[in-house]
Amino acid sequence: MEKIPSNKLKIGMFVAELDRPWIDTPFLLQGFLLEDAEQIKQLREFCEWVWIDPRRSVGADFDKPIAKKAQERRDLGTEPRVVMQKIQKPSGTGTPSAAPIATRKQLLPARGSTSAEAKARGSKGKPRDFAYETKRSSGESSAESDSPAMERDQPAAASGSGGGLRGLFGQLKESVSQLFAREQEDKPDYDSVEDVTRPREDAERPGFIPETVLLTVYEDEKTVENEMEAATAAFQRTSELLEKMVADVRSGDNLQLEGADEVIDEMVDSMVRNPDAMMWVGRLRELDLSSYSHGLTVAINLVAFGRHLGYPKEQLSHLGLIGLLLDIGKIKLPTELLERKSRFTPAEYELVKKHVQLGLQILENTPGLHPDVTDGIAHHHERVDGSGYPLALSGDKISIFGRMAAIADTFSAVTKARPYAETVAPHEALRMLTEWSGRQFQPEMVEQFIQSIGAFPVGSLVELSTGEVAVVVTHNKTKRLRPKVLIVTDPDKTPRRHPSTLDLLYDVSDHPVHIRRGLASNAFGIDAREYYLA
C-alpha cells in the first residue's frame, strides 16, 4: 500500500483505502480502479489522503493487476462437524454528555419541549458506582487492563478524574496500530504484549461517561455453549421484530413498537449473561439477513459496547433500539438507489444522506421513545471533526450514544458481506477504525470498542501458528489475543470432519499455539456458517 495525497491521484490507480469510512463517501466499492476525472474530483472533495495498491493499478508506472482465483466450495461430508471439548478454567442511564448537544428538534419541527437529558438510572439488581468495586476471579485483572494499549509495561497512570485512562491515550494509536499492522510477522511476539498486564486497584471510569451515570460491572454468567440456544432464539425474535417494523413503515402505517421492549430486553439479557454467544450467532447469520437487517448487527455490537462500558440494562436496551432503527429512514428512499452497486452522483449522495431526517420523521410519530434513542439515531453519521452529516456537529456536541453508534455502524458496514465488494476481515476493520480515530471518531471510544469485541472478534477466521484455520468462539477477559477457537482445518487447510476447540490461554505445551494472522471471512473457501454451534 502507498499513501498519497488526493491531489496526486491519476487515472489507472487502484484506490484501496480512504482516510475516512467508505460509508461517509459516495463510493460504495471498498477498493476500485480510477477510470475517469470525475472519480478523482469526488475523491478530492471528500479525502485528503488515500492509499493506493500499486499491484492492482494499471498504466506505465504500474504492473498489471493480479487476478484472484475463485475458491471452490469443499464437500465436508454428512458426519457431525463439531466436537466440543470443555476445558476447566483455573479458579481463581446512558445520559448524553454534559456539553450542549443537538437533538432531533434541530432536524424536525418541535412538538413540545422534550428534554434531551435523561436522568441517571440504576440497573435491575444492584449497580455499583464505578468508583470502584468489582469482583474478579483469582489471578484475573479487570476488563480495561487487557486492551492493547494497556497490556504493555507502562508506568502507573496519574491519579485524578479519568487521568489513569486518559494518561495512556498518548500511546493509543501507536500501540493499537501495531496490533493491526498490515504486514504481520509469521510469529508476532504476543507474549511481550500480554504477560505484563497491569492489575488495577483503582480503575478509572472512561472519561467520556458523565459522573452522574452509575455503571454496572458485568460478569459472564454462562459459557458460550450454554448460552447459544437462548442467544439463537433471542436473535430470531429480534430479527422478526425488525422485519415487522420495516413492513409497518413500507405499508405507510406508523411505526409500532408494542412488544418491542420485551424482545429487545430478551436480547440484552442474553448478552448480559454472555455477549459472545449473541455475537457468534450474529456473525454467522449475517449472510442470511435481509438488506435492512444491517441494523441487527449494529444493535448487537452496540449492546456489547455498552455492556463493556458498564451501562445499566435499561440503557443497553436503548442502545439495542438505536441499532435496530438507525437506518429505518432508508425505507423511504428509492429502491434502485439502495441497490446501487457503483458510486453515487453528487445529487444521489445528497439524497441518500437524507435517510437520517427521514428516519426521525418516522420516529416523531412513535410515542414513548427515549431521547437517548432519538439522539443516537440523529447523530450516528456525525463525526467528531465536524465532517459528518446532517448537522456537521463536532466533539461533545454529538451525544454519547451518537458517537458510540457511529463506531458500531461503521464497523458493521465495512465487515458486511456484499456481492459487489470484497469483504473486509473484522481485525482489518478494527485497524481501519484506529486509523480513522481522532478525526472521525473519539480515540477513547475506539479503544474501548476494540476491547468490547476483541482484537479478533467472535465468529472471525484466524490462522494459527500451526497453519490450521480456526473460528474465534469466545474471548478471554484477561488476554484478548488468546481467545478460545474452533479449529476447522488441518495445517494444509483441508477442512476437518470433526473440528475441536482449543483455548489458547490455557495451552501450556512446550510450543503454545498462537494466532498468526486474521483472515477474511471466506478465506480458503471456508464458510464459517457450516460450523454453527446450535
Image (spheres, helix red, strand yellow):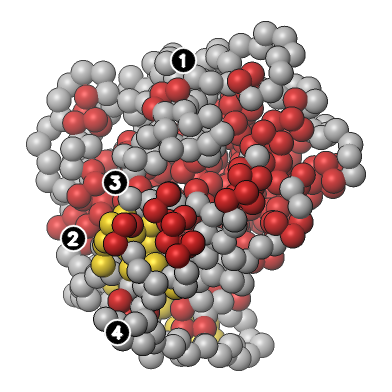
CA distance for labels 3 and 1: 31 Å
Relative placement, left or right, of 315 versus 290 is left
**Image point (76%, 33%), residue name:** 362
Q: Which mark is residue 147?
A: 3
CA distance for labels 3 and 2: 14 Å
Image location (x, y in percent) of residue 452: 42, 45
Q: Secondary structure at mark 2?
A: helix
Q: Amino acid at mark 1?
A: Pro
Whether tag 3 and tag 4 are in contact, CB under 8 A, the answer is: no
The answer to which quarter of the image holds residue 149 is top left
Whether tag 3 and tag 1 are in contact, CB under 8 A, the answer is: no
Dot 1 alpha-carbon crowd within 10 angstroms: few under 14, some 14 to 19, many 20 or more: few
Q: Which one is earlier in the sequence, the residue at label 2 or at label 4?
A: 4
Q: Secondary structure at mark 1?
A: loop
Q: Toward the viewer: 41 or 479? A: 41
Residue on which the image places disc 4: 60
Residue on which the image places disc 2: 191
Image location (x, y in percent) of residue 141: 28, 41
The answer to which quarter of the image holds residue 57 is bottom left
Residue on which the image places disc 1: 100
